[in-house]
């Protein structure tokens, strides 16, 4: 690490601390040339996950879109905001842990439905009805009968 005062290229770490709010490590360093101290922050470099939409367009993954969609599906249902955020956090973690760079929006919808089903049947059906975009009542009834048989 280059000293910010004299530009010397070597320093020693005097103190290290984790910072919860920024998910980084704060390091106090001392220049081996001039002896002055300075602070650096070390963070994990992450590459964004890109979502391929149904129409072929690509946009960065946004956890808030999952939260907003699930909130709508869970309206007037006994599902807490913490549970909804847990679903979004879980999906985000799975995507980041899987080292996925691109994912189809359909797959994300399936991941949401997987997590909603054991949580609340009505919210699951609401989300599915919007997400699957049923073309007619027959398709929707078939979907409901499949749920009932599970």
Image (tube, rainbow, N blue to C red):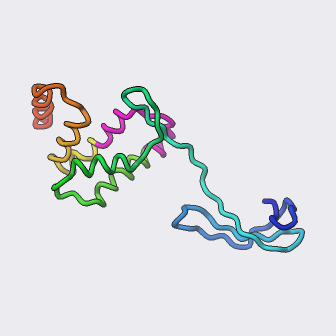
Looking at this view, name the residue that lies furthest to the right.
Answer: 33
Horizontal side, residue 70 vs residue 64: left or right:
left
* Rendered image quadrant of residue 28: bottom right
Quarter of the rendering occupied by the C terminus: top left
Residue 122, percent from left and from top = 15, 46
| Residue 109 included in the magenta stretch of the image | yes
Residue plotted at (30% across, 43% down): 112
Quarter of the rendering occupied by the N terminus: bottom right
- Predominant SS of the magenta segment: helix
Horizontal side, residue 95 vs residue 15: left or right:
left
Horizontal side, residue 2 vs residue 72: left or right:
right
Residue 101, percent from left and from top = 51, 36
What are the residue bounds of the magenta stretch? Answer: 95-112
Residue plotted at (44% across, 36% down): 51
| Residue 11 included in the magenta stretch of the image | no
Residue 120, percent from left and from top = 18, 50
* Rendered image quadrant of residue 77: bottom left
Residue plotted at (85% across, 59% down): 9
Horizontal side, residue 59 vs residue 138: left or right:
right
Residue 116, percent from left and from top = 24, 47
Residue plotted at (46% across, 37% down): 59
């Amino acid at each position: 690490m280059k000293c910010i005062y004299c530009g010397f290229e070597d320093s020693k770490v005097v103190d290290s601390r984790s910072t919860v709010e920024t998910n980084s490590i704060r390091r106090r360093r001392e220049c081996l040339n001039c002896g002055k101290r300075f602070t650096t922050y070390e963070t994990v470099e992450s590459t964004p996950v890109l979502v391929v939409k149904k129409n072929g367009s690509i946009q960065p993954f946004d956890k808030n879109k999952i939260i907003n969609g699930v909130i709508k599906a869970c309206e007037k249902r006994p599902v807490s905001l913490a549970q909804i955020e847990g679903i979004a956090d879980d999906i985000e973690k799975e995507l980041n842990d899987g080292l996925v760079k691109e994912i189809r929006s359909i797959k994300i919808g399936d991941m949401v439905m997987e997590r909603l089903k054991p949580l609340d049947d009505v919210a699951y059906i609401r989300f599915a009805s919007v997400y699957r975009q049923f073309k007619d009542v027959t398709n929707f009834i078939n979907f409901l009968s499949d749920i009932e048989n599970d």
